[in-house]
C-alpha cells in the first residue's frame, strides 16, 4: 500500500507511467530492504540472548511491547483509511511504513520464540498451519504472476464494495496457493528430495 497526496495526473494514468512509478517505488529491491534488515537484526538479537542466557521479560515490559507493536502495525495497515495525506505525510508513510510493520511482526516473533507469546503463540503454532507454511515462500514467488494474469484478464469495470474486494482477495490468495502447490510438487519437492539423497550419500561415505 502506498500513500499518495494527490490523484495521479497526466502520464501517470498511462500504462507506461504506472509501470515507471511501480518500478521506482515498488519493484526496486532497495525500497523493500528494510524488513529484511529488521529480520536479520532480530535473528542476531535472539542469538545473543540465547548465548547470554538472558532472562524473560517482566510483565510491564511485555505489556508495553504488545501495546506499541499493535499500535504500530494497525497504524501501518489502517493509517490511510479515509484520509487524504499531504506530501510530507505521504513521504513519511511510504518511507517508514514497511520498517514499522516489520518491527511489529518482529515483536510477535520475539515473544513467541522467547516462550512468552501466550495465546498468540498457541494460534501460530497450530498444526493446521504446517502445510500452508511449507507453501508460503513458493506462494510469495508465484503470486505476482497470478495477480498479473487476473488484472490483465479484466475486460470491464466492476462495482467496488467491501464484499467484492474480500471475495477477490480470498480468491486470489486461494489461486496463489494452488499454483504454489503445483510449482512445489513439480520443482521444489524433487530438488529437496534429491538434496537429501545426496547429503545422505556423503554422510554414509
Image (tube, helix red, strand yellow):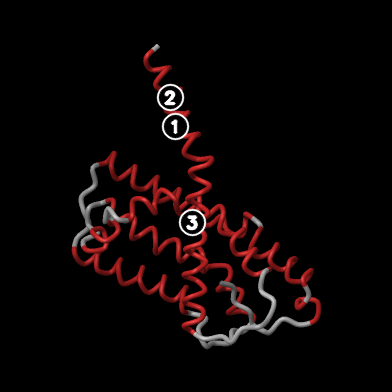
Q: Nearer the viewer, mark 2 or mark 3?
A: 3
Task: Give x and y (percent) for residue 95.
Answer: 58, 67
Q: Which residue is mark 1?
A: 193
Q: CA distance from mark 2 to mark 1?
A: 6 Å
- Which mark sits nearer the N-terminus, 3 or 1? 3
At 48% from the left edge and 84% from the top edge, which residue is drawn?
A: 162
Q: Is residue 127 above or below residue 87?
A: above
Res 61 label: none
- Residue on which disc 3 sits: 178
**Could you tell me residue 13's position as x and y percent?**
76, 78
On screen, residue 94 versus residue 109, left or right, reads right
Which residue does the numbered mark 2 point to in the structure image?
197
Q: Is residue 121 left or right of residue 172?
A: left
Q: Is residue 17 above or below residue 87?
A: above
Q: Position of residue 62 (x, y in %)?
A: 24, 64
Mark 3 residue element: helix
Label tally:
3
**The C terminus appears in which quarter of the rendering?**
top left
128 relative to 85, above or below: above
Q: Nearer the viewer, mark 3 or mark 1?
A: 3
Dots 2, 1 in contact, CB < 8 A: yes
Q: Secondary structure at mark 2?
A: helix
The answer to whether the residues at label 2 and label 3 have Cβ atoms under 8 Å apart is no
Give the quarter of the image for residue 132: bottom left
Q: Residue at x 45, y 53 (%)?
A: 136
Query: Which residue occupies the foreground of this view, 165 or 94?
Result: 165
Binning the other alpha carbons within 10 Å of mark 3 as few (below 14), some (14 to 19) or many (20 upward) gives some
**Direction from residue 34 to residue 115 in the image, left or right:** left
Residue drawn at x 46%, y 79% as measured from the top left: 78
Nearest the eye: 53 or 109: 109
Q: Secondary structure at mark 1?
A: helix
Residue 180 percent coordinates (x, y): 50, 52
Amino acid at each position: 500500500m502506498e500513500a499518495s497526496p494527490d490523484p495521479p495526473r497526466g502520464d501517470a494514468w498511462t500504462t507506461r507511467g504506472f509501470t515507471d512509478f511501480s518500478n521506482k517505488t515498488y519493484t526496486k529491491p532497495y525500497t523493500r530492504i528494510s524488513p529484511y534488515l529488521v529480520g536479520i537484526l532480530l535473528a542476531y538479537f535472539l542469538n545473543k540472548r540465547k548465548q547470554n542466557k538472558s532472562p524473560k521479560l517482566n510483565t510491564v515490559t511485555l505489556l508495553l511491547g504488545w501495546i506499541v507493536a499493535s499500535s504500530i502495525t494497525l497504524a501501518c495497515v489502517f493509517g490511510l483509511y479515509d484520509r487524504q495525506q499531504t506530501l510530507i505525510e505521504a513521504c513519511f508513510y511510504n518511507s517508514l511504513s514497511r520498517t514499522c510493520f516489520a518491527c511489529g511482526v518482529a515483536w510477535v516473533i520475539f515473544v513467541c520464540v522467547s516462550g512468552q507469546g501466550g495465546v498468540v503463540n498457541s494460534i501460530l503454532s497450530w498444526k493446521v498451519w504446517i502445510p500452508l507454511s511449507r507453501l508460503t515462500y513458493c506462494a510469495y514467488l508465484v503470486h505476482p504472476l497470478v495477480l498479473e494474469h487476473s488484472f490483465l484478464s479484466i475486460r470491464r469495470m466492476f462495482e467496488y464494495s467491501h464484499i467484492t474486494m474480500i471475495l477477490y482477495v480470498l480468491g486470489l490468495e486461494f489461486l496463489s496457493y494452488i499454483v504454489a502447490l503445483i510449482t512445489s510438487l513439480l520443482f521444489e519437492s524433487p530438488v529437496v528430495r534429491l538434496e537429501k539423497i545426496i547429503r545422505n550419500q556423503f554422510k554414509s561415505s
